[in-house]
Image (cartoon, rainbow, N blue to C red):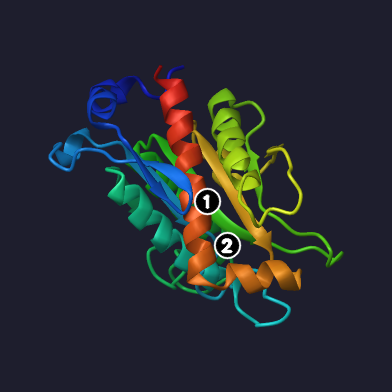
Amino acid sequence: MNFFYRHRVAMGFLSIFLSVAMTFGICFFALSRTAAQTSRLVVVIDAGHGGIDGGVVGIETGKKESDINLSLSRILQTAFEDAGFYVIQTRPTEAGLYGAATSGYKKRDMQKRAEVINESMPALVISVHQNFFSMRSRRGAQVFFREDSASSRLLAANIQSELNSMPECVKKTNALAGDYYVLNCSDYPSVIVECGFLSNAADEQLLVTEEYQGKLAAAILKGALCFLTTETS
């Protein structure tokens, strides 16, 4: 199934107005701002955790993963919007998506994310997370995809390649298959980007800064654009 069939008209605009600009040392695609909003490709950005579910916590700063995820997701939204995309956030605030903080809140939270994704009919989905591991020497960004989704695999590979190219990358890695709800809840190309390890002091020092979050957003955007260009060529 070609997930981008319904976006053919929008990609016509992409091929006409696409240009390259240098930001953070990589290429951005600049799209025409005069194109109608309905013709813009939709991207869903999913800031992981939220509310009473703070996720993991930085070992040095005590920063909650949920807060870092939201900050990076907002920067990522700006990057995609500046490139001409229409962005929908599953979690636009610090609050969770579960309603009342009662039993089963995690399941309700994930179901709401799935609802937003499927109603949006996006070109792609990027779920933002931070990693944690008992071995504190582990560090670096890691992208996950659904194993039986060729489009998600390609999206993950492109984003992972750009993350590996960042000067801060200490060890290049391959995108990995993962069995996660946000990857399985739809057939749209979807990835989870674990941006680094909050269990590693060096990674944490980078991840809590807006400057590095901007660099991550730039790399993720470029990987997504490379994926879209490949899928529609």
Q: Position of residue 43 (x, y in %)?
A: 37, 43
Residue 164, quarter of the rendered image? top right
**Residue 45 in sight:** yes
Q: Secondary structure at mark 2?
A: helix
Q: Is residue 89 among the parts visible in the rendering?
A: no
Please give the name of the residue rendered at 49% of the width and 33% of the height, measured from the top-left corner. 189
In the image, 127: left or right of 27?
Answer: right
Residue 197 placement, left or right of 115 = right
Q: Residue 103 location in percent, x, y?
A: 58, 69
The residue positioned 87% from the left and 64% from the top of the image is 135
Q: Are marks 2 and 1 in contact (CB under 8 Å)?
A: no
Left or right for 210, reference 8: right
Give the residue type that dot 1 points to.
Answer: Ser
* Amino acid type at mark 2: Lys
Residue located 37% across and 24% down the image: 4
Image mark for residue 68: none
Mark 1 highlights which residue? 127
Residue extending furthest toward the bottom:
61
Instruction: Identify which residue, 157 or 19, lies in the foreground.
Output: 19
- The answer to whether 172 appears left or right of 2 in the picture is right
Measured as percent of width and height from the top left, residue 116 is found at 38, 48
Q: Residues within 10 Å of mark 1 (few under 14, many from 20)?
A: many
Q: Residue furthest right?
A: 135
Q: Which mark is residue 106?
A: 2
